[in-house]
Structure formats: C-alpha cells, structure tokens
Image: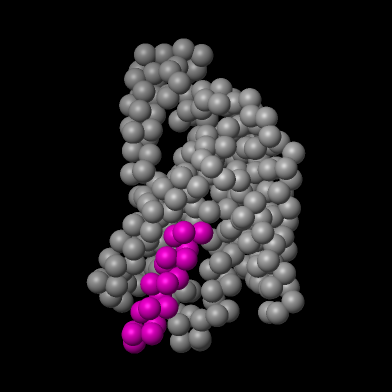
Amino acid sequence: MDFLEIISLLSLIITQSITEFFPVSSSGHLIIYSLILQENYQIALDSLSFHVLLHLGSAVAVIIYFYKDWKDMLSDSLDDFIKFKFKFKLWSNDGMLLIKIAVATIPAVIIGFFFYDFFVGYVRNITVVALSLFIGAIYLFLAERYNKKMNLHTIENVGFKEYIILGITQALAFIPGLSRSGMIFSTALILKIDRLLSIKIAFLMSCPVIIGATIHELVFNYQLIIIDSYLLSLTSFTLSFLTSLIALRLIFKYVKNHSFFIFVVYRLLLSVLLIFFI
C-alpha cells in the first residue's frame, strides 16, 4: 500500500466506526465511500478481512463500554438458571435483561441467515442508500416531533413486547441507509422509552448482532479472509476500537442535552445530494 491508500483506509475506518453508533448508517456510508475511492483503493473496501476487523473493533468497544452491564447480566442469568431454571418470573432484573436482548436479536438472526445473499447482492447500491437515508430521516423526525412524553425511565420497565418491536426494527436496518441505531432510537421514542435509555438499549442490542455478523463471515467465507499485513490489520482493529469508544461517549454526552434533529437534517441533505448528483 502506498501512503495515500493507507490514509484513505484509515479515514474509512474512522468514518465507519463513528457512523456505526450515530443514527446515520455505517453501511450506507461505506457504500458512499466506495464511490469516492479510486479503483485501486477498492480492494481494501471489498476485503472480507477488513470488514471482520471493523466489526470486531466495534463489538469489543461495546463490550468494554458496557462491561458492568454485561458482567451483571451474565452472572445473574447463570445464578438465576441454576436456582430457578425456566421460571423466569423469579429471575433477577439483570438476568431477565439478557433474555430480553436475546429475544430482540431473533428477528435479525432470522433475516440475516435466510436473506443474507439478498442484502449483500441486491440492495447494496447508492439508490437504496439514498432512499433509505430519506425514509430514516422522516421516521426519526416524526419520532422526535410527536413523542415528547416518556413513560419508561428504567430498563426494568421495558418489557418483552417493546424488545420484540425493537428487534424487528433492528432487523430492517440490514437495508443500507436505514441505520440500526437510528431505527432503534426512533422506535424507542415512539414506544415512549427514555432517550438515554433508548441509546443504551440500542447498543446493548447491537453487540450480539455485530458479533453474529462477524461469526457468519468467518464461518461461511473463511476462505476469502487474507491477512496481507499483520501490522496494518492490528492498526485497523485498534483504530476501530478506539474510535468506537469515543463515538459511544460522544453520543451519550450529546443526547443528554440535544435532540436528534441534527441527524435528521444531515440525512436529508445527504440523501438529496446522492439522488441529484451521483
């Protein structure tokens, strides 16, 4: 790789890691980026090894950022199962939270497993991205505009019904441009879940999906994984991990005092730009 290609690759990693956690669609931005890159840079973008490293960096960042939550969920669910088996009414709040997240992941697992080729081969194009950015912007705007009163302020108050609905909307975000975090944020607001709580739930839900996508790529396409440079691979993973941690802190800090309207405007402008100029 020459110097310009390395700079381009690093900027792509930063872009993907940030947009993974902001409601603007990381997959959509990767497709947009592919139009900007010159052809000789496209090899890195299309590399399965590269995508695996990015996903791993983001997943590890989520695990570490919510380490206490994951630790409590795993330890309490194990204790609950030993004591009460499948009598879920007797389980602790943290133990039940893990079950709820698992249930919310099911729609994404089903759609990802049975329709993986469709989403990879047929909807990963700039037209779909532009339309999805626009639709997602309208959905986020309506959620912000018409749902001001929040009723569910603690994570224990969010029931299975809400998690199933959130899981379905997360699965829809396989369409590039919709944004997994954006769909969950919007739906959570409509379900009258507290803003900061909706973000936490979105990222807790994202972790098994990201890990699952990585495992799918490793299991079904392992023959395509080629590590050309261990130093560059380590740098890519580390940069993805660190940028993801920063993005997580930024989004929580931002949403404490601001609405999502800035992301609505950004998505609308970007979709219009794509429709008329590309």
Which quadrant holds residue 142? top right
Q: Decide which of 258, 4 is in the foreground and name it.
A: 258
Quadrant in the picture for the C terminus: bottom right
> How many numbered dots are placed on residues in this image?
0
Residue located 35% across and 56% down the image = 241
x, y (%) of residue 89?
51, 14
Q: Is residue 138 left or right of residue 250?
A: right
The reply to whether residue 179 is in sight is no
x, y (%) of residue 31?
57, 70
Find out whether residue 129 is within the magenta segment: no
Residue located 51% across and 59% down the image = 19
Q: Is residue 232 above or below residue 250?
A: below
Q: Which residues are magenta?
A: 1-19
Q: Is residue 93 above or below residue 12?
A: above
Residue located 62% across and 37% down the image = 188
x, y (%) of residue 86?
47, 18
Looking at this rendering, what residue extends furthest in the left direction? 231
Q: Is residue 222 left or right of residue 134?
A: left
The reply to whether residue 17 is in sight is yes
Find out whether residue 2 is within the magenta segment: yes
User: What colouring does the structure picture have?
Assistant: one colour
Q: Main secondary structure of the magenta part?
A: helix
Residue located 41% across and 61% down the image = 54
x, y (%) of residue 225?
38, 69
